[in-house]
Image: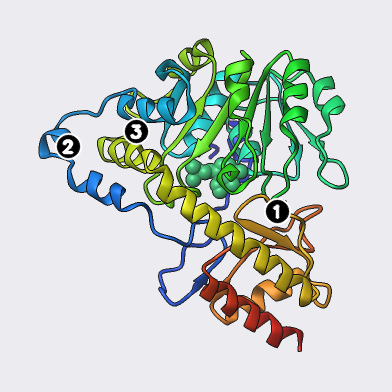
């Protein structure tokens, strides 16, 4: 018996990275931040009252919107809260695409875009990135998408395109440009100002990576008030809860703490990249908290399996342009050293 809509029957669901229960696993597979969240976050969670839990939360998450407005120099009506950036992505896909409205993005990239589009039976066009992950502006514009997604830094490549290139794309597109900045806290620059300069640009952020809160589930989008108002119609009524609103606002306001973590991750990223190159595992230059490295001495899938047997988890993707590589999250110095020691042993 076919219970599901044909597009749901036909599609594959998203496959999240493994979350092992063994605490001794060196976990470098889902791009979490290796450092704990700001102490202000735990204080904010402890300060949540029984009354706040008894009542429904603020449907708009205004305490967080005000924190984001002050950190990014925008107004509250330019901010949309989400249950992780995945919720923001889902809201935008549902609001902007469909069987008659094309969704476009350069590949390889975050595979959830395709999954969310398939759920909506949306028209989709994947456009290849350039050979060195350059932005294929003309090809993207030629598709006339109702919505175009760009992960910048991109995943799983870790590469970025310049703000000028993104602005140029936004100027040429008739539809909305969603800039997925999940990893931008580890980059040298970001596109936030484009959210104020263009009516069709939505800049999307998460607290999962830069703020060490993947378990909390909180993301947000910044864009023109009209764009945000339209998306508000589509979101779940209470898509962010009272605890996460308080915790996320506290995390975002503690910029000093977050910046210290970002600097440590960036330093470790460069050290790890140099060490991997020394082990014949060159990685693309990365502006994120992970490296996409190609073992020159053994197929990537085998290296993934051998590391796993040593209780070191990295990510292997079996799709074009990345199936010969491993995506390695930058861990603490100690975690990275364990990975490097295992690779040294495997390479022989
Ligand atoms: C490119 C990209 N965008 C968005 C997300 C989703 O982030 P969140 O944890 O906020 O749902 C991820 C998660 O890995 C990602 O890699």
Q: Specify the label residue 286 is tagged with.
A: 1
Taking the spot 38% from the left edge, 53% from the top edge, the residue there is 37
Residue named by callout 3: 240
| CA neighbours of label 2 inside 10 A, class few (<14), some (14 to 19), many (20+) | few
Graded by Cα atoms within 10 Å as few (under 14), some (14 to 19) or many (20 or more), the crowding at tag 3 reads many
Give the residue at x 19% y 48%. 46
Disc 1 or 3, which lies upstream in sequence? 3
Q: Nearer the viewer, residue 108 or 150?
A: 150
Q: Nearer the viewer, residue 109 or 205?
A: 205
Residue 119 picture location, percent across and down: 58, 33
Depth-wise, is mark 1 or mark 3 nearer the camera? 1
The residue at the point 57 percent across, 52 percent down is 15
Q: Say if mark 2 contacts mark 1, CB within 8 Å.
A: no
Q: Quadrant of ligand 1?
A: top right
Q: Ligand 1 near label 1 (Cβ, under 8 Å)?
A: no
Q: Tag 3's secondary structure?
A: loop
155 in relation to 309, above or below: above
Q: Secondary structure at mark 1?
A: loop
Residue 49: give x, y in percent of width and height.
13, 39
Report the colour scheme: rainbow
Report which quarter residue 13 is drawn in.
top right
In the drawing, does residue 124 fall left or right of residue 198?
right
Q: Residue at x 60, y 55 (%)?
A: 289
Please say whether residue 256 is visible from this viewpoint: yes
As helix, strand or loop, the secondary structure at mark 2 comes to helix
Residue 342, picture quadrant? bottom right
Q: CA distance from mark 2 to mark 1?
A: 41 Å
Horizontal relation, residue 311 to residue 21: left or right: right
Cβ of mark 3 under 8 Å from ligand 1: the answer is no
Which disc is residue 53 wearing? 2
């Amino acid at each position: 018996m076919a219970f599901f809509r044909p597009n749901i029957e036909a599609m594959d669901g998203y496959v999240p990275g493994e979350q092992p229960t063994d605490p001794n696993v060196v976990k470098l597979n889902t791009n979490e931040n290796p450092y704990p969240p700001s102490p202000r976050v735990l204080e904010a969670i402890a300060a949540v009252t029984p009354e706040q839990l008894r009542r429904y939360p603020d449907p708009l998450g205004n305490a967080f919107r005000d924190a984001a407005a002050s950190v990014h120099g925008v107004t509250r009506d330019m901010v949309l809260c989400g249950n992780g950036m995945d919720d923001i992505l889902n809201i935008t896909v549902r609001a902007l695409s469909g069987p008659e409205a094309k969704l476009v993005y350069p590949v390889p990239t975050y595979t959830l875009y395709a999954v969310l589009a398939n759920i909506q039976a949306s028209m989709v066009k994947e456009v290849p990135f350039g050979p060195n992950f350059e932005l294929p502006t003309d090809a993207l514009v030629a598709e006339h998408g109702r919505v175009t997604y760009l992960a910048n830094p991109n995943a799983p490549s870790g590469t970025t395109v310049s703000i000028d290139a993104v602005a140029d794309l936004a100027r040429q597109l008739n539809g909305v440009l969603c800039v997925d900045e999940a990893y931008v806290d580890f980059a040298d620059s970001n596109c936030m100002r484009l959210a104020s300069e263009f009516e069709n640009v939505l800049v999307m952020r998460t607290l999962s990576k830069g703020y060490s809160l993947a378990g909390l589930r909180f993301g947000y989008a910044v864009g023109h008030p009209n764009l945000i108002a339209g998306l508000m119609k589509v979101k779940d009524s209470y898509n962010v809860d009272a605890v996460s609103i308080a915790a996320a606002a506290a995390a975002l306001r503690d910029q000093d703490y977050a910046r210290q973590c970002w600097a440590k991750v960036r330093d470790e990223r460069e050290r790890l990249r140099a060490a991997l190159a020394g082990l014949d595992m060159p990685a693309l230059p990365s502006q994120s908290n992970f490296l996409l490295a190609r073992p020159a001495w053994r197929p990537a899938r085998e290296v993934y399996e051998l590391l796993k047997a040593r209780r070191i988890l990295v990510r292997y993707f079996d799709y074009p342009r990345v199936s010969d590589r491993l995506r390695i999250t930058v861990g603490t110095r100690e975690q990275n050293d364990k990975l490097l020691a295992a690779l040294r042993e495997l390479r022989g």
